[in-house]
Image: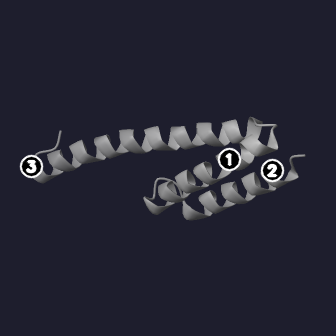
Amino acid sequence: MANHKSSIKRIRQTSARRLRNRYYAKTARNAVKVLRATEDKNEAQALFPKVCSMLDRLAKKNVIHKNKAGNLKSKLAKRVNALA
């Protein structure tokens, strides 16, 4: 167990941030999964900007890496554009 007040606080902050980051990352993964599963082009085009902004926010807050966000957005854009 930590002995310093600052390290005890740091442990509290880290665990709270970890839970928050896990929640947002899981939410984004589910949104990506829903977008990938969508077969209707209009619905996919409506979902795409929302998912992209979610990924950008996560990358900005360092929950996911910025290159991972870019790669996901690129693949999703190709998928949405390929729909009939």
Q: Amino acid at mark 2?
A: Arg
Q: Which residue is mark 1?
A: 46
Identify the mark at residue 79; answer none if there is no mark: 2
Q: Quadrant of residue 78?
A: bottom right
Name the residue rendered at 29%, 41% in the picture.
Answer: 16
Identify the mark at residue 5; answer none if there is no mark: 3
Taking the image as shown, residue 38 lies to the left or right of residue 1, namely right
Taking the image as shown, residue 5 lies to the left or right of residue 20, namely left
* The N terminus, quarter of image: top left
Please name which of the two marks, 2 or 3, marks the residue nearer to the observer.
2
Q: Position of residue 52 (x, y in %)?
A: 61, 55
Q: CA distance from mark 1 to mark 3?
A: 49 Å
- Badges 1 and 3: C-beta atoms under 8 Å apart? no
Q: CA distance from mark 2 to mark 3?
A: 51 Å
What secondary structure is found at the residue carrying circle 2?
helix
Q: CA distance from mark 2 to mark 1?
A: 13 Å
Crowd tier of the residue under label 1, counting other residues whose Cα lies within 10 Å: few below 14, some 14–19, many 20 or above = few
Q: Nearer the viewer, residue 15 or 66?
A: 66
